Image (cartoon, rainbow, N blue to C red):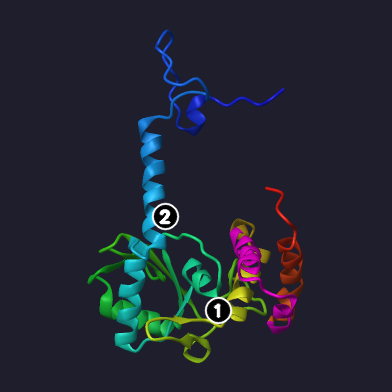
Amino acid sequence: GPRSFGANMIGMSAAAPGSPATTVWGAGPLSPEAEARFASGVEYCGRFFMGESEAHKALYKLTALLDADGLPYAIIGAFALLEYGHRRVTVDVDLVMREDHLQEFKRRHLGKGYVERVPNTGKLLDTEFGVNVDVLSSGRFPGDDKPKPIAFPDPTTTAVRGARFSLLPMPLFIELKLASGMVAPHRGKDLVDVQELIRSAHLSREVSLALDPWVRDKFLELWELAQVADPF
């Protein structure tokens, strides 16, 4: 028969016996705490797509500091997906930098709006906006950090720069996502990001020709999946 779930599994509070019914359908009332979490998430999504979220403010602040300091970087993660053609909400900021440039940034700014979430790493916190900043160092390897043909590139020579932001060329970004998802089961969302990017940006199969052979077959597999019509 159909599976049943306790009301507390999804933040519902069971109605007291004999209490007047407030609805004529559903499994029970949603608790005020669960409803508040839902409303807070919806409001954040609204601010995000208006460019007014805390993550946006942290991104704008960080890139302005890096440009002022002359420290090369490239935005990766969900913010980069926006540029490449897929819209996804995020609550943090992801960058790739050379290790020496990361150390220089920390020397200048730790204790002045930034702290380390994990000592001696690129895991930082913007204390003004409460946003996590994750800096991946050039030369390290995506997913499991084990040697492979794909490594985080040096933005000094690979980034494409705009007036306010610097990103990686899309093929390099896709290679990182694919390599990460292929070797790290806990990073499955990286493969989903590529599949959704293929669909949203209407990427052609020919994009695979610009990718390292190590990830090319996985891209083509995801490209085929992205062509399947969703019945819903």
Q: Residue at x 73, y 77 (%)?
A: 214
Number of numbered markers: 2
Where 34 sits versus 228, above or below? above
Q: Residue lying at the far bottom in this picture: please name it.
A: 157
The mark that comes first in sequence, 2 or 1, is 2
Q: Residue at x 45, y 20 (%)?
A: 14
Element type where label 1 sits in the image: loop
The span shown in magenta is 189-210
Q: Is residue 157 magenta?
A: no
The residue tagged 2 is 45
Q: Position of residue 61 (x, y in %)?
A: 30, 74
Q: Position of residue 202 (x, y in %)?
A: 66, 71
Q: Nearer the viewer, mark 2 or mark 1?
A: 2
The residue tagged 1 is 152
Using residue 99 as the reference point, say whether residue 69 is left or right of it.
left
Q: Position of residue 138 (x, y in %)?
A: 51, 81
Q: Residue at x 66, y 64 (%)?
A: 195
Secondary structure mostly seen in magenta is helix
